[in-house]
Image (cartoon, helix red, strand yellow):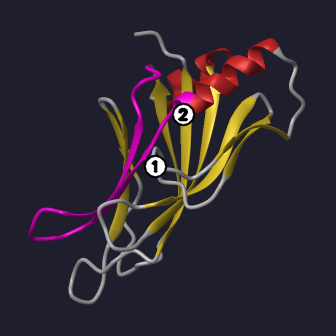
């Protein structure tokens, strides 16, 4: 399948992640999209970790969501799943399509995404056109867990800008 662009995900931090072990958690984040899977570093003994890790995926299919899963690293047993969140990629692709037909100035808010049943956003968030890329800062509420949020930024780089970069990443 032809690549549509690159997807850079900057996983900034976790907020109020639950304890999975007796006194602490050792969290890390796995971001997957279809068969692709990348992960952050593990942060020891921290329920409010700061990762500031940048992860890159190839954007290949518009119907495949981004799935973010937070795990607790365990030494002698299987890692525990803390929680997860899903991100629909279609709003970014629609915004990119619009940018091809218009000469957008940097900093323009292309779309506003409201929290709702179809996403895990904690508050409204804007997709912004900046330096030829779509960027969105967001805070996601983890699902299937009593508490926990993850702050991140998504950057979608269109194919025409990412072709040279893509092969350097892989």
Horizontal and vertical percent position of residue 46: 40, 79
* Mark 2 element type: strand
Q: In screen coordinates, is 68 left or right of 125? A: left
With 61 as the anchor, is 151 left or right in this view?
A: right
Local crowd size for mark 1, using a 10 Å CA cut-off: few (<14), some (14–19), many (≥20):
few
Q: What stretch is highlighted in magenta?
A: 61-90
Residue 95: mark: none
Viewer-proximal residue among 73 and 63: 63
Residue 100 found in image quarter: top right
Question: Which residue in the structure is indicated by mark 1?
Answer: 117
- The residue depicted at 54 percent of the width and 17 percent of the height is 4
Specify few, some or many for label 2: CA neighbours under 10 Å numbering under 14, 14-19, or 20 or more.
many
Q: Which residue is drawn at 34% across and 77% down?
A: 18
Residue 123 sits in quarter: bottom right
Residue behind mark 2: 7
* Left or right position of 55 against 130: left
55 and 1: which is toward the camera? 1
> Vertical placement of 50 versus 152: above or below?
below
Residue 63 belongs to the span the image colors magenta? yes
Q: What element carries label 1?
A: loop
Quarter of the figure that contains the C terminus: top left
Q: Is residue 23 left or right of residue 4?
A: left
Residue 12's spot in the image, x, y percent? 56, 61
What residue is drawn where x is 61% and y is 31%? 92
Q: Does label 2 or label 1 sit earlier along the sequence?
A: 2
């Amino acid at each position: 399948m032809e690549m549509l662009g690159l997807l850079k995900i900057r996983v900034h931090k976790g907020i109020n992640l639950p304890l999975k072990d007796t006194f602490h958690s050792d969290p890390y984040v796995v971001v997957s999209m279809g068969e692709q899977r990348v992960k952050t570093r593990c942060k020891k003994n921290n329920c409010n970790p700061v990762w500031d890790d940048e992860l890159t995926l190839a954007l290949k299919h518009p119907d495949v969501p981004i799935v973010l899963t937070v795990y607790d690293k365990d030494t002698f047993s299987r890692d525990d799943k803390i929680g997860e969140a899903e991100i629909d990629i279609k709003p970014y692709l629609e915004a990119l399509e619009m940018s091809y037909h218009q000469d957008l100035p940097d900093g323009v808010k292309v779309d506003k995404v409201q929290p709702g049943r179809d996403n895990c956003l904690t508050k409204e968030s804007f997709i912004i056109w900046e330096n030829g890329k779509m960027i969105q800062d967001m805070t996601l509420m983890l699902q299937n867990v009593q508490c926990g949020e993850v702050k991140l930024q998504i950057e979608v780089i269109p194919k025409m800008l990412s072709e040279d970069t893509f092969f350097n990443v892989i």
